Image (cartoon, rainbow, N blue to C red):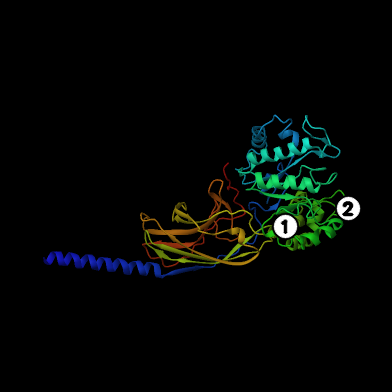
Amino acid sequence: MMLAVDRRSFLRGAAAALTAARARAQAGEAVVAPREYEPAFANPLKGWRPSIANARKHPFATLGKHYIRWNELENSAEDGVEKIRQFSSAQWKGLPEANTKVIPRVYLEWPDRGTYWPADLETGDYASDRFKTRLARLIEKLGEAWDNDPRVAFIEIGLIGRWGEHHHPSPTPEMQKLIGDAFRRNLPNKLAMNRYPWEFEDYSFGIYWDSFGHKEELVRHAPVLEGRLAERWKTAVMGGETAFDWGTPLGKNPTDAVANNADQVIELVRRLHWNHLGWLADYDAGNEQAARNGALIQKAFGYRFVIDQARYTANVIPGGGLEVALKLRNTGSTPFYYRWPVEVALLAAQSRRPVWSDVWPDLDIRKWLPGEHEVRASFKTPDNLEMGRYLLALSILDPAAGRPAARFAIANYLKGGRHPLGWIGVGTPIDSAEFSEFDDLAADRSLGYAT
């Protein structure tokens, strides 16, 4: 009987000791203040946007523009969606491995080059019912091919007028409704942009401004972008390109504009909340002044997330709770435009590979507008987690493959896309959370996604 009593007492004492140990393990809190990573770097879905052919050559590009002739995708009504898929796969080969995405624009006419109407449509016939039927059907096919294609970042509506720029001719109100309804219905997962901010008034599209900063267009664009569309940038993408072949551009050529007028470019990017620009992206990176200013403009484009402070449970036990809180700033000009998940992971001390990870619950990084933000969440570690010392790390995942793809602008970085905040003990006390064996963020070009 005494043995039984002793055993029960031992179990009660052991349970009490375990409870006390658990309380002690979870009582400590690590507070980390990461250093901001000052240089510019390539990050998905923002920044300099050269042509798709030149995207891999650009130091900051993760976006590439692709002008596509209508008759390359569909030359007759009999051509099906598989032709679009085959064309896309052939033209966009290698984009996932380069962590690059495409902004396609389908067009019918290119002055001084030619017209690219399907063989069974009459060239220049924008008004007939036959054309309208085919237009709606093409957008339906594009939706089947591209709406869930992770290689497609955003889509410029195009289709109407020279270069697909919605002039010569401009889309009538009837045409705007036909196109707007078709895009909204068939491409709900992709953000679309139209050319002029005073068109497609009933739709929440972004804008591709193809003469960005021209004073001749600024006087017309700015009142709408800062008036009726003043809040549009919070949910819709603003992009396009500069132009150097008419009017009053930002410089004599891309290199001149970036080298000598960067302050003006940055002022417009921040004032109008611009996400990306092309043509200007063709500046000569061998020009030292252009290269320096190109980096400054890259930092202004789109989002740029800086973590100022991270607080987390310093000691946990297998199956125990983990609290994480962040104070961060978006020092860029826009939010991140898709709901990509933020991962919290424990990395093995030696291999730096994740032994456990979870997605931050109910977090929508699209809401991280320029300014300061605080977020916190609770996680549960697995019951079978081995005791020891780990690194607590964050990453932003491309949902196409669930792999790290977008980065925070902090020095706490490991090649492969994860940000180690500091050490954490699992059933093992830690004296300090400090960790400083970082890799250079901008030098890492190993990131990619899957189709």
Q: Nearer the viewer, residue 270 or 283?
A: 270
Q: Mark 2 Cα within 10 Å, few/some/many (few <14, many 20+)?
A: few
The picture quadrant where one finds residue 28 is bottom left
Quarter of the figure with the N terminus: bottom left
Residue 350's x, y, as percent?
A: 44, 54
Query: Considering the image in quadrants, where does the C terminus appear?
Result: top right
All told, the count of numbered labels is 2
- Please, which residue is most extreme toward the right here? 247
Residue 309 picture location, percent across and down: 54, 67
Q: Which amino acid type is marked by label 1?
A: Trp
Residue at far left of view: 1
Dot 2 or dot 1, earlier in sequence: 2
User: With 149 as the anchor, is 224 left or right in this view?
Assistant: right
The numbered disc on residue 247 is 2
Q: Any mark on residue 80, and which? A: none
Give residue 274's mark: 1
Kindly report the distance in space between the C-alpha atoms of the residues bearing marks 2 and 1. Answer: 21 Å
Which secondary structure lies at badge 2?
loop
Quadrant of residue 98 within the rendered picture: top right
**Pointer 1 local density, CA inside 10 Å: few below 14, some 14–19, many at least 20:** many
The image position of residue 61, as x and y in percent, is 68, 49
Mark yes or no: residue 286 visible: no
Asked if residue 375 can be seen in this view, the reply is yes
Relative height, residue 199 to residue 19 (above, below): above
